[in-house]
Image (cartoon, helix red, strand yellow):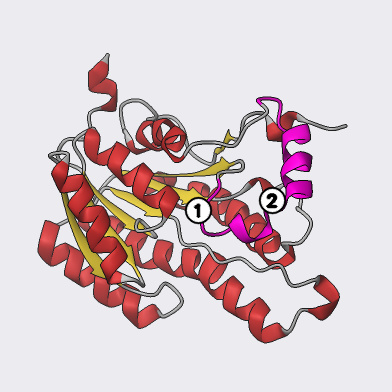
Amino acid sequence: MMNLFDLTGKTVVAFGGNSTLGAAICKGLAGHGAKIAIIGRNLEKAEKVVQEIEAEGGTAKAFKADVSTREDVVKVAEDIEKWSGSFEVLLNLPGKNSTTPFLELEMDEYDDIMDVNLKGTVVVNQIFAKKMIDKGTKGSIINISSVSSTTPLSRVFTYSVSKAGVNSVTQYLARELAPYGIRVNAIIPGFFPAEQNRKILDDARIESIMNHTPMKRFGEAEELQGAAVWLASDKASSFVTGALIRVDGGFGSMTI
């Protein structure tokens, strides 16, 4: 049964793989045999993740790119092709947040967050899916969404809007790319203390989150590995596409 989750011979392209959650997911994928391209705006952080993967016997390489710049994405796609030849799994993790109240929100800030979280996801999927189609590569695209994508959270208006868009993109592309053997799904993480949300986790908000999370705790980054490995495997999740997979401690099941 372990062969269901064997990713040996697959290359994973991980945009935002240098983040807290991204690094944990990438280590999980590498641990099942995948070769990982870690991509981020901060090359030093990406190289640190590579070193951690290599220390555990995995194979990885760091690349620098900004998903809000199309030229960067095109260039890094070419660089990864030179390094690995092809890629079978695309993981989209970039995320940007803000606590600016809606009535005070300037459009420059709105555009900046949307460029990374939503437009960046669209551009990356477009460029990498086209290359997979041209090569006849069957594979898996995994977008990282958020619990705020289905029920908008307070204090994070633009982030919530952008992640709702990611869900829509995921389901549209699942239909669009299925004829080419490319599956497209999204993981909806619950509350995992990371770069994006630490600044708004005051005592009152933490209490509210715990009251709305049946498991009464935050998630650990490593708890996202299972869903990612499952979705990356063309054996374990071969008939799964267009799905929004919750890893949220039950947050999405609560009403009152």
- The residue lying at 51 percent from left, 71 percent from top is 116
The span picked out in magenta is 193-215
Q: Give the camera-side residue of 202 and 82.
A: 202
Instruction: Pinpoint residue 93: horizontal percent, then vertical percent.
Output: 45, 56
Under mark 2, the amino acid is Ser
Measure the alpha-carbon separation of dots 1 and 2.
21 Å
- Quarter-of-image position of residue 49: bottom left
- The residue lying at 76 percent from left, 40 percent from top is 207
Name the residue that disc number 1 marks.
173
Q: Is residue 172 above or below residue 25?
A: below
Name the residue that disc number 2 marks.
148
Instruction: Pinpoint residue 97: horizontal percent, then vertical percent.
Output: 61, 65
- Quarter-of-image position of residue 34: top left
Residue 211 drawn in magenta: yes
The reply to whether residue 197 is in sight is no
1 or 2: mark nearer the eye: 2
Instruction: Pinpoint residue 209: horizontal percent, then vertical percent.
Output: 73, 40
Q: How many marks?
A: 2
